[in-house]
Image (cartoon, rainbow, N blue to C red):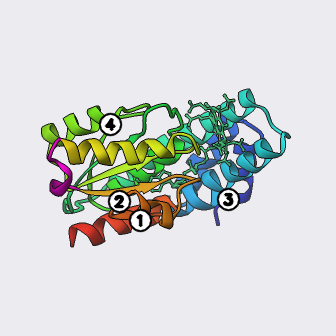
Amino acid sequence: MADFESLANAVIECNLGKALELTQKAVDEGAKPADIINQGLIAGMNVVGQRFRKGDMYVPEVLMAAKAMNEGMNIVKPLLVEGDVPEAGKVILGTVAGDLHDIGKNLVGMMMESGGLQVVDLGVDIAPEKFAEAVRKYKPDVIGLSALLTTTMLVMKDTIEVLQEEGLRDQVKIIVGGAPVTADFAQEIGADGWAPDAASAKDLVLELTGK
Ligand code: B1M
């Protein structure tokens, strides 16, 4: 049985080497990739978030913990997408303008890929016009907007407005998410859906695309 608690602790302790070793060990022991992520890597990062909020951890430590989590993810990610998963649609993902947080967004992308979705990740700090450009270029089924700041979640509304102005709104479904974003807010700004976490975001897209 994989030791998810020690893996979570390795992330909390910003111990990259140990996080990689325990992630690999869990993989070798046959643990489910989703369990390694949810019960180990994300569980650790959630504690880091709580400690950061209370002022018990500082930015450099948070960055090191995020690196340990991300590199662990890099070991697990190929296993999530492995296998002949039929393509269930195309999603453009991005963190909105002014926002540099990408850990959650990356996770959402990973979960979506594991669900057979093709993901075009535009990255962070993406201006509304860039999303519009990407819709023209990639013709996705869904756009996923991520925001982690109460200030930048407002840019989600701007993004939807620009898509409307450019005549692209009806061509795509738009879903939003990120820690400060709520279902009510999503409805208020005219998004098609909201998901509280990466796994639900994948389910929501599959529901919206009817696949
Ligand atoms: Co930032 N930060 N940060 N930060 N940071 C928060 C978000 C904050 C809540 C911390 C706090 O003060 N308690 C706070 C926001 C406060 C607010 O707006 N109300 C904050 C702040 C203030 C800031 C800065 C302004 C700090 C400063 O410089 N003074 C600055 C802003 C920089 C910018 O963006 N312009 C900043 C910077 C940073 C770092 C660079 C140090 C780093 C980001 C590294 C990176 O992403 N590459 C960082 C981090 C790591 C955090 C915390 C600690 C952790 C975020 C995280 O990765 N969580 C965070 C505190 C917290 O959340 N507890 C905090 C783990 C991740 C797996 O969860 O991203 O929520 P999350 O994603 C979840 C769901 O939200 C959802 O699924 C994911 C997984 O299940 N989800 C979606 C996310 N996107 C989705 C999209 C969907 C659907 C679901 O559909 C498309």
Q: Give the mark nearest the N terminus, 1 or 3.
A: 3
Labels 2 and 1 touching (C-beta < 8 A): yes
Residue at the image position 51 percent from the left and 61 percent from the top: 197
The residue that disc 2 covers is 191
Q: Over which residues does the magenta segment extend?
A: 166-172
Q: Position of residue 185 (x, y in %)?
A: 49, 60
The residue that disc 1 covers is 187
Give whichever of 162, 183 is nearer the camera. Answer: 162
Q: Is residue 56 visible?
A: yes
Q: Give the mark nearest the N terminus, 4 or 3.
A: 3
Q: Is residue 206 magenta?
A: no
The residue that disc 3 covers is 4
Q: Position of residue 45 (x, y in %)?
A: 66, 48
User: What amino acid does circle 4 point to?
Assistant: Pro
Measured Cα–Cα span from mark 3 to mark 2: 36 Å
Q: Give the mark nearest the N terminus, 4 or 2.
A: 4
Labels 4 and 1 touching (C-beta < 8 A): no
Q: Is residue 60 above or below residue 25?
A: above
